[in-house]
Amino acid sequence: PHPRAEVARKLGVTITALKNNDMDRPLTTAEIKALLADQPEWLRTARTALAENRGA
């Protein structure tokens, strides 16, 4: 399993976004790939928000 910071990096979100969506736990590579393949609404929203924040 990957630690929180690595999970957040691989998903393209903040650690806070993980915590706010009860995903604040180590995830395996397979779990991360599954989330990226079929992104829940919270993940799409968090990725968009982070991208906009970094672009600003």
Image (cartoon, rainbow, N blue to C red):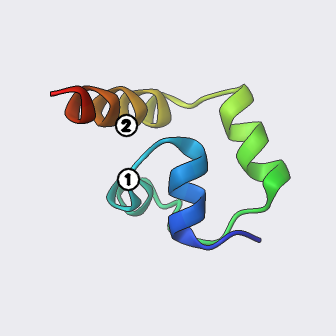
Residue at the limit of the structure toward the right, as seen here:
30
Residue at the limit of the structure toward the front, as seen here:
55
Q: Nearer the viewer, residue 6 or 35?
A: 6
Q: Residue sitting at 42 percent across and 33 percent down?
A: 47
Q: State the residue position of label 1.
A: 14
Q: Nearer the viewer, residue 53 or 41?
A: 53
Which corner quadrant holds the N terminus?
bottom right
How would you rate the neighbour count of disc 2 (Cα within 10 Å): few for under 14, some for 14-19, many for 20 or more?
some
Q: State the residue position of label 2.
A: 46
In the image, residue 1 above or below residue 33:
below
Would residue 39 be found to the left or right of residue 30 on screen?
left
How would you rate the neighbour count of disc 1 (Cα within 10 Å): few for under 14, some for 14-19, many for 20 or more?
some
- Secondary structure at numbered mark 1: loop
Q: Residue sitting at 70 percent across and 69 percent down?
A: 2
Label 2 amino acid?
Ala
In the image, residue 3 above or below residue 54:
below
Residue 33 in the image: state x and y as whole percent. 77, 40
Tell me which label, 2 or 1, sits earlier in the chain: 1
Residue 17 in the image: state x and y as whole percent. 37, 52
Asked if labels 1 and 2 touch by Cβ distance under 8 angstroms, the answer is: yes
Q: Quadrant of residue 39?
A: top right
